[in-house]
Structure formats: structure tokens, C-alpha cells
Image (tube, grey):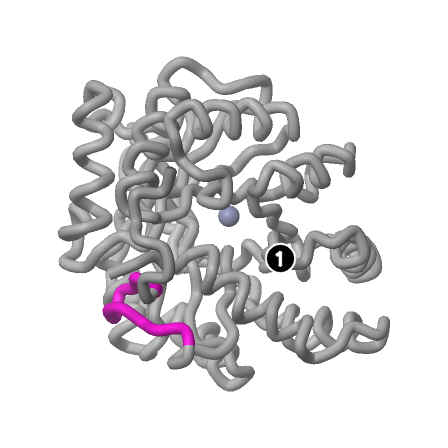
Amino acid sequence: MNEQPAGAERYLYTTLGLFRRDSLGMILPHEHVFVDLRTPDQPGYAEADTGEVVAVMSPHIAEVQERGITAMVECSTTGVGRRADVDLAVSRATGMPLVVPTGSYREPWIIPAVRAADDAGLEAWMLRELTERLDEADFRAGWIKLSAGDDGITPLEERILRAAARAARRTGAIIGSHTIRGRVAMQQLDIIESEGCPTDRFIWIHTQIEPDLGLHDEAVRRGAWIEYDHVGRDPDGDVRDLILRAIKAGHLQNLLVSHDLGWFDPALPAGGTQRPYTHLSDTMLPLLRAAGIDEATLTQLTHDNPFRAYSRPA
Ligand SMILES: [Zn+2]
């Protein structure tokens, strides 16, 4: 039961405001501009000079703007160095809209404020970030990013997921979860269904890591999105074949592809070494064309699908 009216016009909620589908081209659904994988209790966690981040990341964003990428989803949530203010500065400098999440990463990365909140408080916080403003910057969250432990969802992670499902049901926002095991993703789908949240408001991030492809199929059968976000990280033939298999299996409507690359890392001198966001445009799309995939299908994969997944009514 999605509480949003059917057929209402949908928008992508970004650092630079709301975007209609026809004002956008290709959208990268899973990348990182700024990440800190140290736990939040570490000295210097998520701290960086904003001007330095802008200087380091702008050329990487310009590269994909030249290739027709018109928006990117920032997948760094609270606990792994979310800095919505830094994302906003990068967007203003480059003109690239970023879709920034509310939500929380898994244990042990959960920030004290999330750990301390009760169920109603968690839901109210996510709703506030989705509908008013993010804690650290004055724009609205575009989605809800969370995660679950590799061996099963913990009680705190389940409380965060249930609050997210209630916030998603009320706003139409999508939940994306970093989930390594398919059986944990199925458990998460059970939980969001039990909260009355439609399964098409769930993205199983890193689906490719689950070796049992039957679970990829099962997630799609249940209405969820699957995401192959290893373009440019795993061998090209393997990534291509997984995408081709999904299309052949009839999963095109539920499929997202991205790099899961970038980023400025404040734990490393000068932000570390970035890995480009260009491999999809330069290598994977040509490989899919060579395998006989037509332009309409590629447009669906790179434009329609990410927009449909991440957009919601105004
Ligand atoms: Zn990621």
C-alpha cells in the first residue's frame, strides 16, 4: 500500500533541486563522491577541506558529464562519512546533481544519534531528511540507504529497516541496502512487506556478490530491484554476461547497473587515488551493443530505470 497517489508526477530529489525525467539523460545509480570507511568513533572521521574535495572530484565528474551523465546517486550514508554539505559544494562547482541518502550503514558503523533513537525517532528523522532537509545541508534526501550484516540482520539494523520502510511507504522514497547474501535480502523483503511498504521500493545493492542466481531471480519475482554495481571493478566479460543473463531472464525492468567507484577518502593523504566513473560509457555499453542489445534497452538501463527507481512524487 503505497500512500502516494498513482500517476502523480515523479521527481529526482537532488543537491540542486527536483528534476523531471525529461530534463535528464543518463543517471549513474551507485557511485561515491566522499566516503570514510573508518568507524565514526575514529579521530578525523569524515573530516576534510571542502575546497580540496571539490578540486579533487570535479575533474572526475566533468569526465562523465562529457559522456552524457546528467545525475549521480551518492551512496555514502551516515556511518560511512556522509557529508551532504560537501556533496552540495561539489554539485554547485560542477553542475552535477547528486541524489544523497538519509539512513544508516550497518553495525559497527552506526552513528551515536541513530543508535540512541527509538523507533518513532528513527522514522521521524528519516522523514525530516526526506521532506525538509538533511542534517548537515539544506536540501532534501533523495532516498534511504542502509545495510545489513553479512550473517543476518541484527536487531538494531532491523529497527532501522522497519523505520525506513514506514518512511518509504509515506513518501514513495526508495530504500537501497548494501546486502551481500541473498538470503539476508529475502529477510529484508519480508520485513518491508510486513510494514506495508511495496517491494518495488527496495534495491538489493551488490546483488552480483550472491553466487546463487536463483536468488537474483527470486528478488525480481518479488518485485524488488537488483543492482549489478561492479562495472569497471570485475572482469568486463563477467559483468557483461551477468547483465545479458538478467535481460534474457526478463529482468530488464528491475535492473540497475553502476560502478560503485570514486571517491575522496579523508583517511588518505589528499583524498587517496580516485577510480573513474567512465567505464560504463566507454567499455560496458559498447560491449552490450556488440552483444546485440539495442539502444532502447540501453536507454532503459541507463536512464529510465535509475529515474524510476530513485524518483518520487513532489
Ligand atoms: Zn557503494
14 in the magenta segment: yes
Residue at the spot 30% in from the left edge and 62% down from the top edge: 13
Report whether residue 45 is seen: no
Q: Is residue 138 left or right of residue 109?
A: left
Q: Residue at x 60, y 49 (%)?
A: 227
Residue at 57 percent across and 42 percent down: it is 223
Side (left or right) of 141 relative to 65: left
The quarter holding residue 18 reads: bottom left
Q: What element carries label 1?
A: helix
Prevalent SS, magenta region: strand
180 in relation to 261, above or below: above
Give the total number of marks visible in the rendering: 1
- Provide the residue designation for mark 1: 253
Specify whether 240 is left or right of 279. Answer: right
Task: Please state which amino acid type lies under the numbered disc 1.
Answer: Gln
Answer above or below: position of 307 versus 131. below
What residue span does the magenta drawing correspond to?
10-21
Q: Verify whether residue 304 appears in magenta.
A: no
Please determine whether, in this image, residue 45 is positioned above or below residue 95. above
Where is residue 113 drawn, in percent x and y? 20, 28
- Between residues 55 and 20, which one lies in front from this camera angle? 20
In the image shown, does 197 or 16 lie closer to the viewer? Answer: 197
Quadrant containing the N terminus is top left
Image coordinates for residue 159, horizontal then vertical, percent = 34, 20
